[in-house]
Image (cartoon, rainbow, N blue to C red):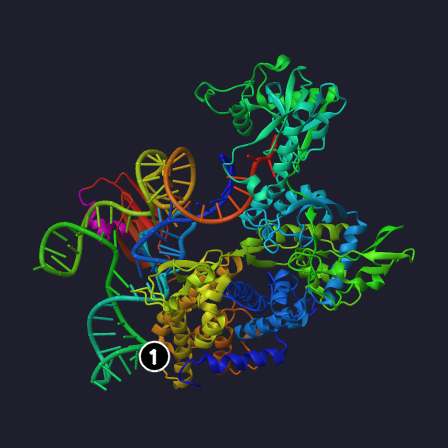
Amino acid sequence: MDAKYNPKAIEPKWQRQWEEQGLYKASEDSSKPKYYALSMFPYPSGDLHMGHVRNYTITDVLARYRRMQGYNVLHPMGWDAFGLPAENAALDRGIHPRTWTYSNMAQMKKQLQPLGLSYDWDRELATCSPDYYRWTQKLFLEFFDAGLAYRKAAVVNWDPVDQTVLANEQVDGEGRSWRSGAKVEKRPLEQWFFKITDYAEELLQDLQKLPHWPERVKVMQENWIGKSTGAYLEFLIKDRTEKIPVYTTRPDTVYGVSYVVLAPEHPLVAQVTSTDQKATVDTFVQKVTSESEIDRMAEDRPKQGVPTGGVAINPFDGKEIPIWIADYVLFEYGTGAVMGVPAHDTRDYQFATQYGLPIIPVVTAPEKDAMTDAAYTDPGVLINSGSFDGVESPKAKKEITAYAEAQGWGKEQIQYRLRDWLISRQRYWGCPIPIVHCPSCGLVPVPDEQLPVLLPEDFELSGRGGSSLAKVESFVYTTCPTCGGDAKRETDTMDTFIDSSWYYLRFSDAKNTAKPFDSDQVNHWLPVDQYVGGIEHAILHLLYSRFFTKVLRDRGLLNFDEPFQRLLTQGMVQGWTYVNPNKSGNAQWIPSAKVDANDPKDPETGEALVGSYKTMSKSKYNGVSPDEVIATYGADTARMFILFKAPPEKELEWAEADVEGQSRFLSRVWRLVQEYVDAAETHMAPDPKAERNLRRAIHTAIKEVTEDVEENYQFNTAISELMILTNALSDAKALRGSGVYREGLETLLLLLAPFAPHLAEELWNELTSDTQGIHSQSWPMLDSSALVADTVTIVVQINGKTRGTFETAADVSKEQQEELARISEAGQRYLVDATIRKTIVVPKKLVNFVI
RNA sequence: GGGAGUGUGGCGGAAUGGUAGACGCAUCAGACUUAAAAUCUGAAGUUUCGUAAGAGACGUGCGGGUUCAAGUCCCGCCACUCCCACCA
């Protein structure tokens, strides 16, 4: 055995060995319980960063731990491989997006390999491979068949020069295309949608089935779904037959309506506008619709609007009120029209004061909140409300809604903020939508036997954001699968979030060539027992995946409601870097390793620098790459550091000194075992007390590490327990000849195995004659009887303040304990002249005298 | 504006209502060494009194409360972080 711990010598050796043994292949052994551990699969950017390492290390520890616990573990890895960066790379470098993507995947796999992660690579998948996207298309057709995939016009950013659709991020602050510089137009275009709103209620309700998800993720999803209960009410239009429907959560304030506002895009705008207001209204609509979303939503922006000249009639009191249009009303939400109640709504109040509209209080505020210069938005008692005067708000809501319903001009309505999911993208590097447009048959799904609809090879990229497929004639022109006539293919591709909405299902049956997955397989392995990933996916990815699961359940393809049983959102990895305020962009970030901390200067220009944190997920510019760390310290040290430095859900600051600390700890373990193996077993006089103490330390460690890993993901405290056990063994070298000491070393290695797999394997191999390897061993069993201590420390308190302690036998009775406390040094000192009013005895822990 | 969370030494962080600061980093002292590194041993919240051994006071963002006992439970503040946000 080497005298010195040298990770470079042992890590590659064991990685090869594990690979050859096929140690991490998930089997179909149904005699064992299953455990499915999953990290969110990466986008193959070509650059593995510390955030990835943290993510994958966490699931790896759990996977290894569960294997030792006797579980049949599924721990797969794959690639979220479609997406825009590949297309941009193709534009910039003139290479095929596939070439770029696959070379990145190879690169990242190479970077992952030395980490010693226990993946079942047999199940590797890439969403851009036809073997995978064939089934994405099949699932799309399931949605289509269920009526959950549909087309409708949606307003998009249109570049009139490049003749292409732009993403919101591709439009600059002034509403110009980043590429052509042309003023971007808002155009309604036919787009594909998934009807996620059909599942809004279940997506909301089933959050209750997820007790092991972080509260804040559930709250975010809840807010995103945004359920509210209110009333749908119809206002009449004077001299016309149409009605203006509004949605309100405050039907109790309906007598306070002093105007009605339509969104500028609302179809009724044309009908209600009077001739003399037409020019004003047209100009206003033009102005608002040409503005970017960002401008229109901008904070603190004053609300703008114009009167249409039209007059509405409040059906409750027959009062005539003006119809306005305003930019603060959103066309997409509710009915796209709002009743204006300035007295009881903050936004309406702002608008009304700005344009001199009447403010009519209809809900009384308690004296202290009496309305002065703001809207009163809390509940109260109704006034000025006809026959509803004197009714309290909550009751009035119900009564007024019921009254409207009886009169036929309203009803109760539940409203969600969740919108349908716009899934079509006008891009090349995505999964083609398997639909044919036939002039006579309409939208025709591509039949199963013609799947996959392959991405064409001969294409020309039409610029960022544009549809390249539409220009590939051999792709576009086809025949209708139904009637055989001339037809065109759909040229949109799917949002990449669709690819990632079902990959965790595919892992259960990754090589199936007949269907997306076999139901028995998916029902066996799913739901995922532990899902780990960044908080940035708290809403979209997780919501879409939940939606997919529910739809596929309703299609009979699987039998569970929720895909991810437990969710852990890991914190970011940050690094201390310096900023050069004189530079811009990425050049301003300078890794701390290149800078003298006492005199921070830009190594290139000599300019003074300012310290700052930067997230390691954009790690190109801040120095510490996983490759370097592994090359310097080894994978085990990197893993230990990242788990020990902070609890998993918190941010983690990269610090070289702490990495060295972990390296030191592993070296200590190495020496401990080596010295034991080298030392001739010395016989010594038995020391039962010391042996019992050591055994207690061993089993305390088993208990603590098990609880930390299994229940709370407290890897940081689990590792500190390993350190405590190591220190105890270090201190107990006199016991080397005893069985307890050996038990201690073996237990230490077993407990360490999920965290530092290579070191544990190497030392296990040296220490024991076992040939199966440490990762095939069982997790150590806890012997609770070993935890019982011979003696206990009793705390003596006077009036709740600790005044001393004493040691006594663990089987001390309550009475003895009190008496011992009384005669203890502290007791003697404080109780001499005192009257004891009360004594509290906590058995085996504490005695408190109140004097 | 709405919601969620956090606040403990020089730092990362521990603490089923029961000795606050486990474990580690950094620091200091000692041993080993010609020397350094590595390694090992030890010290250490702040403060007052004391030459010292020691003794006391104060300490978990702030102010109250419950309790024999509060970092932990309750009430009210403050600060910071994150998410959503003209959603009627």
Q: Residue at x 58, y 23 (%)?
A: A341
Q: Nearer the viewer, residue A820 or A628?
A: A628
Residue A823: in magenta span: yes
Which image quarter is the N terminus of chain A in?
Answer: bottom left
Dot 1 falls on a residue whose secondary structure is loop
Q: Which residues are magenta?
A: A820-833
Residue A850, picture quadrant: top left
Give the amino acid at mark 1: Ala
Which image quarter is the C terminus of chain A in?
Answer: top left
Residue A188 at x, y = what percent?
Answer: 71, 44
Magenta part, dominant SS:
helix
As displayed, is residue A627 above or below residue A326?
below
> Viewed as shown, does residue B43 lie left or right of A681?
left
Residue that numbered label 1 is attached to: A685
Residue A243 at x, y = what percent?
Answer: 73, 25
Q: Residue at x 55, y 46 (%)?
A: A174
Which chain letter matches label 1? A
